[in-house]
Image (spheres, rainbow, N blue to C red):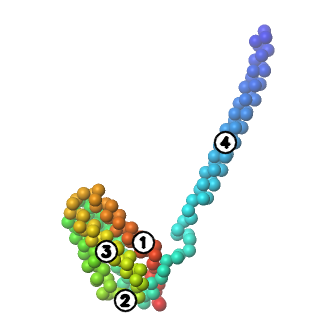
Amino acid sequence: MSRILCLPLYRGKQVFLGGVALGVIYVVLSAGCTQVEHRHIEQASNPYLTSDTRHPIPLTPPAEKEHRVVMLQHLETIQVIMNALVEEDYELAKGLTETHLGFFMHRQAMANQQPENFPPAYHDLAMAHHAAAEELARIIPTKDLKQILPQFNNVLKACVACHLEFKVKSGS
């Protein structure tokens, strides 16, 4: 009979301990969620929502239009080169890299634009881009993607570096 009388006390302790356990779990989960939200707030701000700190390049409207055409051609060429590499058409990838991204393209672009409107730092970044493209063209015939892709990445880094530093400002 003493066993039956102890059951309600035991159940009372179970209910109490279960409640305490649920309370602890709730507090831990709440703290964990608060921590996650806090970390989310600490993340770097969105660069597209921050102020634009790029240096403007003053070009006339026709020169600005020409410059945008060249930049779009570079982007399209990058895509076609990537596709040629995917298709294992190394000859096409090399030819496009040399003629559309290498030093030949730089000379063509500068012949059609106003080089005096571009600051020396822009020319340095452009030359780094073209040099990276020349190195990519040199590596492509190896057909070794472990060599090609890092160099392709260097070309993209050069593009991004310039676009982060400069923007075209028309009408000046």
Q: Residue at x 47, y 90 (%)?
A: 172
The crowd level at tag 4 (other Cα within 10 Å; few <14, some 14-19, many 20+) is few
Report, in whole angstroms, how far the alpha carbon at label 2 lies from the one at label 1.
Answer: 21 Å
Amino acid type, label 4: Val
Question: In the shown orientation, is residue 136 left or right of residue 10?
Answer: left
Res. 52 in view: yes
Residue for badge 3 = 130
Number of numbered discs on residues: 4
* Secondary structure at numbered mark 2: loop
Mark 4 or 3 closer to N-term?
4
Amino acid type, label 1: Ala
* Secondary structure at numbered mark 4: helix
Q: Which mark is residue 28?
A: 4
In the image shown, does 35 or 12 lie closer to the viewer?
Answer: 35
In the image shown, does 91 or 122 lie closer to the viewer?
Answer: 122
Q: Which mark is residue 114?
A: 2
Mark 2 or 1 closer to N-term?
2
Report, in whole angstroms, how far the alpha carbon at label 3 lies from the one at label 1.
Answer: 13 Å
Question: In the shown orientation, is residue 144 left or right of residue 15?
Answer: left
The crowd level at tag 1 (other Cα within 10 Å; few <14, some 14-19, many 20+) is some
Report, in whole angstroms, how far the alpha carbon at label 2 lies from the one at label 4.
Answer: 64 Å
Mark 1 or 4 closer to N-term?
4
